[in-house]
Amino acid sequence: MPMRLHERRVFKPWGRTDIPEQFGGPSAEPLGEIWFQREDGGTDDPLLVKYLFTSDRLSVQVHPDDAAARKAGHPRGKDEAWVVLDAQPNASIGIGLGRPVSPEELRGAALDGSIAGMLDWREVEAGDAFYSPAGTLHSIGAGLTLLEVQQNCDVTYRLYDFGRPRELHLDQGVSAARPDSDVRKSIERPLGDGRSIVAEGPKFILERWRSRSGRLECSPWCLIPPGGNVRANGAELPPSSVWIADEPLELDVEEGAELLVAYEGSTVRPRS
């Protein structure tokens, strides 16, 4: 059997109290994120899965790539991907810049707040997906429920925080940023046999599997069942849970159900 990952609830100033029932219902404190990890924290796992709930904009931020992260003492950098699960009208994500800027201009814009307007803000709706490489300047807007898959690295450099009294990281953020980054919305790409790619980049791939059965051979796989009847070795994988498959297993995704599957690397893996 795959291993069910433990939930870790993280409260944030931009989080929400009106949490959907499938994630536990209303929260007394603003819940921003639910992390899914092994009981020991799972720091050796290459990927981390989260759900995000926003009532306000996140900071304008950036994450380091592998080289910068290792230089700072971390095992890896942080590419990430988002799948929009629910979006209020006019909800948006700022990802990348509308034009290239110099490090000096970027620092000045962070100091005076104009950096927020430099982001490429895009209205989003349920089903939209983005792969955001490390070094991409970004901010997630209010009114969103997202699934996030990322390299397993808890390093965020804030350049501007919309007036919230939290620490900024201007030197590290400007150094890590790729001011010429241009990120496009992912277009789901069919692979056949009930598989499609939702988002992909150099560090990991996120697939959607529908109404298929088969055997997983290579591992690890990160299994995320959003809904419907999904079974692994005959046991049900409940919706809104997250699992790690470290060994081969038989998988059954019934008609009308789906399963999101993430794995490290840039090469599409054989399914069975």
Image (tube, helix red, strand yellow):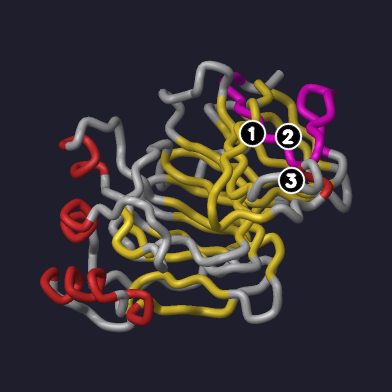
The reply to whether the C-beta atoms of the residues labelled 3 and 2 are less than 8 Å apart is no
Residue 135, compared with residue 21, is above or below; it is below
The reply to whether the C-beta atoms of the residues labelled 2 and 1 are less than 8 Å apart is yes
Mark drawn on residue 106: none
Residue placed most toward the observer, 162 or 165: 165
* CA gap, disc 3 and disc 2: 39 Å
Q: Secondary structure at mark 1?
A: loop
Horizontal arrangement in the rendering, residue 156 relative to residue 264 (left or right):
left
* Mark found first going from the N terminus, 3 or 2: 3
Residue placed most toward the observer, 85 or 158: 158
Horizontal arrangement in the rendering, residue 218 relative to residue 249 (left or right):
left
Residue highlighted by disc 1: 272
Q: Residue 63: image x %, image y %? A: 32, 51
Residue highlighted by disc 2: 214
Q: Residue at x 64, y 26 (%)?
A: 6
Reply yes or no: does residue 100 show up in magenta: no
Q: Residue at x 66, y 59 (%)?
A: 145
Residue placed most toward the observer, 107 or 211: 107
Mark drawn on residue 27: 3
Horizontal arrangement in the rendering, residue 124 relative to residue 97 (left or right):
right
Q: Residue at x 39, y 63 (%)?
A: 161
User: Magenta segment, which residues?
Assistant: 230-247
Reply yes or no: does residue 233 show up in magenta: yes
Q: Residue at x 84, y 24 (%)?
A: 234
